[in-house]
Amino acid sequence: MLPPPNSLDRRHKYGFRRSNPSWFSSANLLARSRATNLAVSVLAVVATLSFLLNVQLYYFPPTNAHSILSLPLLASLPRLQDSLDHLVVVPGHAIWVGIDPAQRMQPSEWAFQSFQTDQDTSRLEVFFQHISRAADIGLQDEKSLVVFSGGQTQHSSTTSEGESYLRLALASKVFGHDEFSRATSENYALDSFQNLVFSIARFHEVTGHYPSKITVVGYEMKRARFLDIHRTAIRWQDPFTYIGVDIPGDNSLARQGERENGYLPYAADLYGCHSFLSNKRKQRNYAARYPPYYLSNPRLASFLSWCPYEPTSIFPESLPWSTGLKTHIEQEKY
């Protein structure tokens, strides 16, 4: 019989592996099976700490979301106009590309969508009446902010509906001859629902808070769309005024078009994110613009992304303005 290996003789002869406790402990930990157990233990500890941290953030979120986003690091922001509480919205319908406001009645001074190419001067005058009526409200109410809303919707123009309305308002001096700071533009909305929601978000960017009162100046035929559908979709309970200014004369065809292409589609798709209304947004957003309000309004991020499987489902989470008890709805016809 062959003698056993020398290494085996030494282990049995001297027994140093069992006689040295510290060596035995480290050797066991470093053994293949022990190393696996150690790794699992470390991962379990890390997972537990991560779980506890997430629980803490969920139940005790930071009190100031802006501190996470560090907006001042991204832009040099002016002093907030925090005394304002009244949002005046003017939805845009075209882009004024002119320079001289005296020529605003000329169709060549405007960029329209394809279906709007046949414009008459009465329609162009209504655009300006929307602007001037909102300016009157802004001058009368020192706590108001006038927001001209509308995105870059035309191939023939590099500006937005909202910016062009503001430019026309200032060039026409509807706010007076002095500089007027309580008017701004919202440059990303692609339809009436976004006109309303994005203007609220823009109000927050300028003031640091959300309005307690909203006035919309637009077509009379769109009153029901804003009061019955859009206001319901955003769960607005505070005072809401709609001022309607329509084209003089018989508007029966326009009202029929509004019902078929506006009111009824939104009644079936409250947030405008399915098929028909969604496609209209895509067609108007040819410049691929992304609204900034997810960053500047983090409390609205989930709401701005809301697109329910059931198109008439109301957004169920809390909203910054949905905790009030006011239910008064004001209506005014110009």
Image (tube, grey):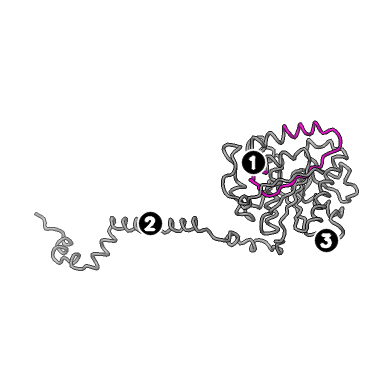
Say if the magenta span includes residue 147: no
In front of the other: 259 or 73: 259
Residue type highlighted by circle 3: Glu
Q: Name the residue under label 3.
A: 179
- Magenta segment: 231-260
Visible in this render: residue 150? no
Distance Cα–Cα, label 1 vs label 2: 44 Å
Q: Which part of the image, by quadrant, shows the N terminus?
A: bottom left
- The extreme right residue here reads 102
Mark 2 element type:
helix
Coordinates of residue 318 in the picture (x, y in percent): 58, 50
Residue type highlighted by circle 1: Tyr
Q: Residue at x 84, y 43 (%)?
A: 126
Residue 138 left/right relative to 121: left
Q: Residues within 10 Å of mark 3 (few under 14, many from 20)?
A: few
Residue type highlighted by circle 2: Leu
Coordinates of residue 35 in the picture (x, y in percent): 31, 58
State which tag comes first along the sequence, 2 or 3: 2
Q: Which of marks 2 and 3 is in front?
A: 3
Q: Name the residue under label 1.
A: 271
State which tag comes first along the sequence, 1 or 2: 2
Mark 3 element type:
loop
In front of the other: 102 or 10: 102
**For residue 334, what is the image quadrant?**
top right
State which tag comes first along the sequence, 1 or 3: 3
